[in-house]
Amino acid sequence: MNLLDENFPADQLPLLRTWHIPFRKIGREVSHLGMEDPDIIPLLHRIRHVTFFTHDRGFFDAGLCHGQYCLVWLDVPPDAVALFIRRLLKHPRLDTTAKRLGPVVRAHPDAVEFWQRNRPDPRHIAW
């Protein structure tokens, strides 16, 4: 499942639908509006096998790596988040749920940076 943070830009949702990218949004289909950031990680543990997309830099933390989910910080302008979700989901290293489970990812225009469990330094892959 692709899960979007509740503050995901509304004008980007139609693009995801046009590209047939399935998603749910916190506050609409999952949980409740106004969910606090500390409550998101326990939610991801309950849902399992989820890729969570956020614009919140606070989620790019190596300590949040977990084999049951993937956290993606979209470090891009708000009008580009849908495009970068699409790029990330089509990337050969991240194009299946199984490949995405575990890391904490930063997607930005230059590359994809990610933390993995039991690795001291972040890794980088080109687009």
Image (cartoon, rainbow, N blue to C red):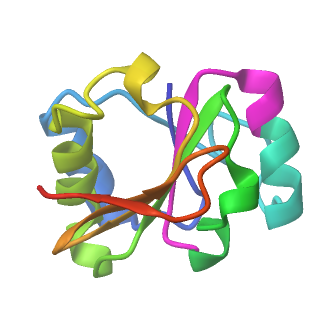
Residue 44 makes an appearance in the image: yes
Residue 36 makes an appearance in the image: no
Left-right relation of 66 to 18 = right
Left-right relation of 39 to 81 = right
Image quadrant where residue 48 sits = top right
Numbered label tally: 0
Q: Which percent across, then down, holds residue 6?
A: 61, 58
Image quadrant where residue 61 sits = bottom right
Q: What's the residue at 25%, 46% (across, down)?
A: 88
Q: From this viewpoint, which residue is outermost toward the bottom?
A: 77
Q: Is residue 45 magenta?
A: yes
Magenta-colored span: 44-56
Image quadrant where residue 43 sits = top right
* Residue 123 versus residue 7 in the image, above or below: above
* Residue 49 versus residue 56 in the image, above or below: above
Quadrant placement of the C terminus = bottom left
* Residue 20 versus residue 113 in the image, above or below: above
Q: Which percent across, then down, holds residue 12?
A: 28, 59
